[in-house]
């Protein structure tokens, strides 16, 4: 069977567009004295893409998965574990990450034990819960937490951070970021320490930068994945001016084109995923099936580049399209292209079913 980077399905990666996004992001954040942690999980920390980050001068690489950090051990950049460490993986976290984000004292104790064994100082950023209700210590629990952490021999508290717009959809604004900065200052004053990193969130915080909002001058770090990969701020999911949203394009081949009824014929129950779907009757229309399914990628995050095409649904190996309104006369063997949202990009980049083709 033929198998090379040009076989479909594949993700085309437009190297210059991606490079432009990363470089522009670094520049944009620098104006606010903000350094970015370039988040690699959206592309499974693939070597070729991390190389691009490196070329643009990224100093900090961050990922939520140890398995991805393990792919980057030879790199000179600081490595950050974004997801709270699993306590049973404390050893690996200390081995693979220079810094981890934390909110549980039991885990930090385990990290300290591992760091003692490995004769290392492990740095941590304390995550503060500011209302989105994902990870973080509640503000009034901060002092108890910090007082124990600073007594640990091999843990160094280097900063505080927050995560917003992830679970609750709470957007970062000037007041949330000021609260974070104030907590940092209070920790410094109470414990006579200096915090170097005040991490004001993820790509959702970019919205404030794009709009030239005044944000607390102590905020000096953002953890950015989607913003550099897809050029979107994630508070409202808007494309940012000057950034490319098409550095990654998914392509695959048409395997069937037919005129069929839009309405299924027969007694209907659930589909192969246990879902009951509502199907609109638009009469007979032109349908195409492409060689791509849920086993490859989340079809809900795909947007056909041909805007005359709509995605009707997908099973494990097939995605079904309505191509009636397209100006193109598609036939079996033609290739179709799709833009990907962040969730589909995640899947496509780590899928072994999908080739990656780097286009200079
Ligand atoms: C994934 C992740 C990020 C990056 O989020 P984007 O929206 O892709 O910028 C930042 N912080 C944490 C803790 C994460 O898990």
Image (cartoon, rainbow, N blue to C red):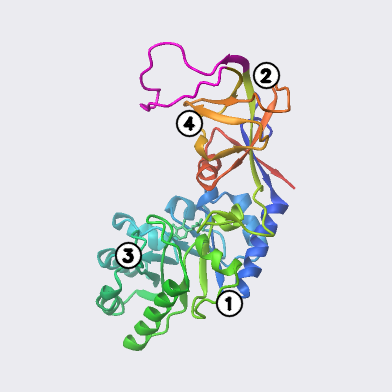
Q: Main secondary structure of the magenta part?
A: loop
Identify which residue is drawn at 59% across, 25% down.
322
Residue annotated with mark 4: 295
Earlier residue among tags 1 and 3: 1
Instruction: Check contact, mark 2 vs mark 4: CB within 8 A.
Output: no
Residue annotated with mark 3: 114
Q: Which mark is residue 33?
A: 1
Earlier residue among tags 3 and 2: 3
92 vs 149, nearest the viewer: 149
Tag nearer the camera, 3 or 4: 4
Rounded to the nearest whole Å, what is the CA distance between mark 3 and mark 4? 38 Å
Q: Which mark is residue 332?
A: 2
**SS category of the residue bearing label 4:** loop
Identify which residue is drawn at 50% across, 52% down.
41
15 vs 231, nearest the viewer: 231
**SS category of the residue bearing label 1:** loop
**SS category of the residue bearing label 3:** helix
Tag nearer the camera, 2 or 4: 2
Report the side of 265 relative to 248 (left or right).
Answer: left
> Quick check: is the Cβ at mark 2 less than 8 Å away from ligand 1?
no
195 vs 32, nearest the viewer: 32
Rounded to the nearest whole Å, what is the CA distance between mark 1 and mark 2? 53 Å
Q: Determine which quarter of the picture holds residue 155.
A: bottom left
The N terminus lies in which quarter of the figure?
Answer: top right
Q: Which mark is residue 49?
A: none
Tag nearer the camera, 3 or 2: 2
Q: Indicate the position of residue 102 as horizontal and vertical percent values.
A: 35, 65
């Amino acid at each position: 069977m033929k198998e090379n980077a040009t076989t479909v399905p594949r993700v085309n990666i437009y190297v210059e567009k991606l490079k432009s996004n990363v470089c522009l992001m670094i520049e944009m954040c620098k104006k606010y004295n903000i350094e970015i942690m370039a988040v690699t999980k959206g592309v499974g920390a693939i070597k070729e893409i991390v190389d691009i980050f490196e070329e643009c001068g990224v100093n900090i690489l961050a990922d939520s998965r140890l398995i991805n950090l393990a792919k980057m051990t030879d790199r000179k950049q600081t490595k950050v574990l974004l997801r709270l460490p699993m306590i049973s993986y404390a050893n690996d976290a200390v081995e693979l990450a220079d810094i981890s984000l934390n909110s549980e004292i039991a885990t930090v104790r385990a990290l300290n034990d591992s760091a003692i064994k490995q004769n290392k100082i492990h740095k941590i950023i304390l995550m503060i819960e500011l209302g989105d209700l994902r990870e973080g210590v509640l503000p009034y629990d901060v002092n108890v937490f910090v007082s124990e952490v600073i007594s640990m021999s091999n843990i160094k508290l280097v900063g505080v951070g927050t995560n917003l717009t992830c679970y609750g959809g709470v957007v970062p604004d000037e007041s949330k970021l000021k609260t974070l900065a104030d907590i940092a200052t209070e920790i410094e004053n109470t414990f006579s320490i200096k915090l170097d990193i005040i991490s004001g969130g993820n790509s959702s915080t970019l919205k404030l930068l794009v709009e030239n909002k005044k944000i607390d001058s102590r905020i000096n770090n953002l953890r950015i994945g989607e913003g550099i990969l897809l050029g979107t701020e994630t508070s409202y999911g808007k494309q940012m001016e000057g950034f490319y949203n098409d550095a990654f394009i998914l392509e695959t081949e048409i395997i069937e084109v037919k005129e069929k009824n839009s309405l299924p014929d027969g007694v209907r129950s659930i589909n192969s995923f246990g879902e009951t779907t509502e199907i609109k009757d638009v009469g007979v229309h032109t349908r195409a099936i492409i060689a791509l399914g849920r086993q490859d990628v989340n079809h809900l995050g795909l947007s056909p580049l041909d805007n005359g095409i709509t995605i009707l649904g997908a099973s494990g190996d097939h995605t079904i399209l309505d191509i009636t309104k397209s100006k193109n006369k598609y036939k079996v063997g033609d290739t179709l292209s799709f833009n990907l949202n962040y969730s589909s990009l995640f899947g496509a980049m780590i899928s072994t079913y999908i080739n990656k083709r780097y286009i200079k």
